[in-house]
Image (cartoon, rainbow, N blue to C red):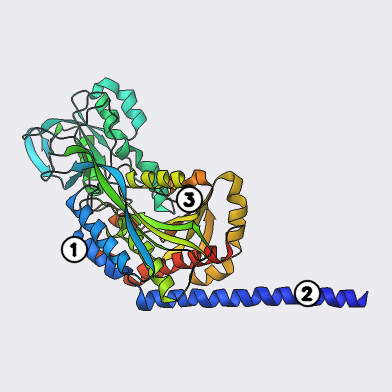
Amino acid sequence: MMRKSITLISLLFLAWSITQAQSDDDAFVLKQIHTAALEHGKAYTWLTYLSEEVGGRLAGSPQSKQAIAYTFGELDKLDNVAAWKQKCTVPVWERGEKEQVIIRQNGNIVKTLDVLALGYSGSTKRNGVQASIVEVHSLDEVDTLGFALDGKIVFYNRPFEVNEMNPFHGYGKAVDQRVYGPAKAAKYGAVACLVRSMTPNYDDVPHTGVTIFPDDVEPIPAIAITTNDATWLSNELKRKVRTDATVITSCKAKGNFKSYNVIGELTGSVSPDTVILIGGHLDSWDVGGGAHDDGAGCVQAMDVLNLLNQIGYTPRYTIRAVLFMNEESGLGGGKAYADSARTSNTFHLAAIESDAGGFTPRGFSMEADPEVFTRYYRKASDWLPLLEPYGLTLSQGGSGADIGPLKSMKGLLVGFKPDPQRYFDFHHTRNDRIQNVNERELELGAAAITSLVYLIDKYGLE
């Protein structure tokens, strides 16, 4: 009996020793990854070019084509990386000449607002449209007012809930008025729509973004105004002084055209038909440089391949960086990629999306088909002791728009979560430029994603 006890203790000690050795090895690799990112990362150099040399990259625009050519070329330069372009179909919209919103009281011009047309806004004649303004705070309020809005300019003015600790939650509660509000107003005869910018800040910077008009609704001019101007306009309307606006836009929807996702991969040495994907979206709005949204996610995905090369790691599975086209206005790239994956029956063990800016990494949120999620999440949670020294946590939650169509394939979907507090300072604005991205934070984000890729690749998710 004593011998059996000693044998059991010896086996347990051996198992502990092996586990501890593996943990030490993994900690060493994660340290290598972070060192390589800070010393040899390429993300900031790539992002500088995308933001400052290419600039805003609306799907189908000349700038989007430059971005495709540039990122394909940079991926193709990386050792051991195969790069290619994947066709997708994207809608093309042009902003046209500078938008104008001129406020009049009793016929006199009192203020010209700093504005941006929302994506897929309609256009006006050269002299614009002029009408009185009706302030609302919800889509339901528009339904209540109904055809009393005929011939009016509807002004959506519901602010972020600033008590939300995560600004993305505040965004989610406010953004319906931008996405669906103009079409709702148009159904009741409104001639134009003004929308409070999607930011918790009080500032003088307008934030654009997509608005959706169903096929049976003729697009009307839809304009984002700054939060300071929204507050001023609301106060003026409360004074009961007759307040009109002249709105001038020359936007144009041009139809659907061919574009491309850009893909680069390190082929797996054991199971090359199983893929671990990392990605971001290559398109951005046409103002600013699309640095945080989402050049950062694209260059971090590219840098994962670079960093694995830097540490000399040979993956078991295929590690694939995908730069999706058309996330901002239709998910053309994400849908095309998922269709191709289903057609080829390519199993994506995990897909990681970075689309929340290039800020300090905080962790990852995870989702999957309910049939597989519990065991995947339990496995990933085993790695927390390795991730926590880098300030990284794991949580259950959403992943990303472009990888969402892969969910039915029953892999793990992961959203990279940097610190969210400053994201809506820059989101969809002229200020989304490289000077507002911290190089160290960006590279640490690439290192965090690479660390998770390494652990999934080494241990799988079962």
How crowded is the residue under tag 2: few (<14 C-alpha within 10 Å), some, or many (20+)? few
Q: Residue 11 bears which disc, if any?
A: 2
Question: Is the N terminus in the top left, top right, bottom left or bottom right quadrant?
Answer: bottom right
Q: Position of residue 381 (x, y in %)?
A: 59, 61
Residue on which the image places disc 3: 346
Q: CA distance from mark 3 to mark 2?
A: 40 Å
Q: Position of residue 107 (x, y in %)?
A: 7, 33
- Location of residue 97 by image quarter: top left
Q: Is residue 328 visible?
A: no
- Is there CB contact under 8 Å for labels 2 and 1? no
How crowded is the residue under tag 3: few (<14 C-alpha within 10 Å), some, or many (20+)? some
Amino acid type shown at disc 2: Leu
Residue on which the image places disc 1: 53
Name the residue at 27% across, 43% down: 90
Figure check: 5 above or below 143: below
Figure check: 184 above or below 252: above
